[in-house]
Amino acid sequence: MNKFNRIIGKVLIWRVKNISQKHFILLLSLLVGIFSGLAAVTLKNTIHFTHHLLTENFNLENRNYLYLAYPMIGILITVLIIKYFVKDSLGHGVSKILYAISKRGGHIKGHNNYSSIITSTFTIGFGGSVGAEAPIVLTGASIGSSLGRLFRMNTKIIILLMGCGAAGAIAGIFKAPIAGLVFTLEVMMLDLTMASIIPLLISAITASTIAYFFLGKGAEFAFVLEAPFHLNNIPYYVLLGILAGFISLYFTRGIMNTEKQFGKMKSPFSKWIVGGLSLSLLIFIFPPLYGEGYQTIISLLNGNSQEVMGGSFFYGWHDNAWALVGFLVLLIVFKVFATAATTGSGGIGGIFAPTLFMGGVTGYLFAKVINTLGFSEVPSSHFTLVGMAGMMAGVMHAPLTAIFLIAEITNGYGLFIPLMITATIAYLTIMYFEPHSLYTKRLAAKGELITHHKDKTVLTLMRLDKVLETDFKCIKPDMTLGELVKVISTSKRNIFPVLNHHEELQGIVLLDDIREIMFNHEMYSETKVEELMSLPPAMIECDENMDKVMRKFEETGAWNLPVVKGGKYLGFVSKSKIFSVYRRVLIHYSDD
């Protein structure tokens, strides 16, 4: 390790002498694009190989009882790998990235360069009803973080490289570089500046090229538009947007509430048993819930809807239009529980693929009902694609990512107008009920979310321990006024925290409150500090975020507030110190 560090040190010295910072960032973004593209190719291939190996002998007519075993086996392997080898949490990959940006200075543990690929392969390949996108995005961001820290980049550049990794991951999976770029700007909430746009583009294009080289021209569910877009279908796209917004709300709250129930279970074994059995049973009854579900979307796009019911109890009614409608409704209802059961029981995966699955099924179902009832004759494939965009916009709060992703995978922009209509309306619909996406909801509740709002972003980046002041003279409640005056004579502060023998804060003494009596010698021996002290207008707990700290200052009008940990005194925070640090962070964050 020491030899490696010496080599890196020499490389860094050579780099500083020969390569400018700006050019070196472009070189790093290229490397991040290559590695994140390779990671995407690796994961897609391993999942596809595992899925094919396990299910190649399954057929549409018969029920496949191995569905009852595969998901439990895959999740058990995942749980054991995490417990005995990784020894760290891997869940909610995108949320983990956002937390690393806001609270860890872009630091992601090195094992994330590979651990999410391994664990999600077993989870998804064996039937876990989640997507590979979040694990790959976490892997890409981790690669960017690792390279940035290896070459001693500052926090701002490390965060940019994490964004490059995320953009490369999405671009590599879908061969959609624009969608990868927009995903980073919308979901990871990086600012769009000339300093960031070029590295992000380099990574996205590089990863997409790597994916084309190894996987060919075919996209995840490539589809070429054949029928033109008709203006008279716009009202139906508006209705689909509203429907997608409400189903996004159902998906968001369903996932959160179900995972909360799993969170109440203390034993990982209990979670695995309950979640694994629930997932296996759901997949046995509804085989399309197996894995990512992209094969179902492909079947719907190609008009082979009867394949969707294959291997289920309902296959005998695959020629009945209303039976198909009922089956698709049940898929939408139970996909939420299948996804939550996968992650809640210990599986690794994301909500990207489930969102696209539910969106595609919703769009096809909407078109099927319209056509069956005879209201109009609308192209079901168009509504399948537009429904995917609507659900993405609703669940992920990323309408631009949804629009560009679907536009890119259809090899053109023939559906651009309906994509914009449905995605925008779905987004506006869910925003009325849920201001935060599944990715950001947990962090927002703790005040740990980076946003495009500069003030809130700077406050999120600030840490309480960086503004804590500890040079206040502490006094005891049983001290006399005379003893207090001696302490005042050696202090440069006008506030004196009063602590008991357990170092717990009892109150404060303000110099202004005792100015009139502090020279009255008659009171020196008979007046105690406990008679002079008062309670502070508010106290700050050491784990509170800066947004909440600033609200306390605004509510109380105070200029200094004490900081405690479980009642024990730690120091004071002042407005002047906060403003000083705020200015430094803002300048650093905004500097191009």
Image (cartoon, grey):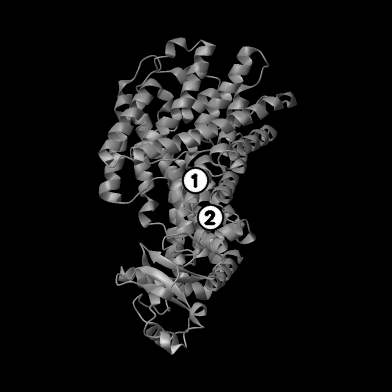
The residue shown at (36%, 64%) is 567
Residue 492 drawn above or below residue 71: below
User: Can residue 95 be spotted in the picture?
Assistant: yes
| In this rendering, the label closer to the viewer, 2 or 1 | 1
Task: Identify the amino acid type marked 2.
Answer: Ile
Residue most toward the right?
231
Residue 590 screen position, x and y as percent = 60, 64
| Circles 2, 1 touching at the beta carbon (< 8 Å) | no
Amino acid type, residue under disc 1 in the picture? Lys
415, 335: nearer the viewer: 335
Image position, residue 507 (x, y; %): 41, 70
Name the residue beneath numbered marker 1.
Answer: 441
Q: Of label 2 and label 1, which has the lower sequence position?
A: 1
x then y, percent, for residue 21: 55, 69
Nearer the observer, 81 or 250: 250
Marks 2 and 1, how far apart in space?
A: 12 Å
Q: Is residue 335 left or right of residue 64?
A: right
How many residues crowd mark 1 within 10 Å: few (<14), some (14–19), many (20+)? some
Tell me what residue is drawn at x 55 percent, y 40 percent: 434
Crowding near the residue tagged with mark 2, few <14, some 14–19, many ≥20 C-alpha atoms within 10 Å: many
The image shows residue 265 at horizontal and vertical percentages of: 30, 39
- Numbered circle sitting on residue 450: 2
- Is residue 56 visible in this depiction of the protein? no
Q: Quadrant of residue 226?
A: top right
On-image quarter of the N terminus: bottom left
What element does badge 1 sit on?
Answer: helix
| Numbered mark located on residue 196 in the image | none
In front here: 322 or 454?
A: 454
Task: Count the labels in the image.
Answer: 2
Task: Describe residue 121's horizontal placement relative to residue 304 as left or right.
Answer: left
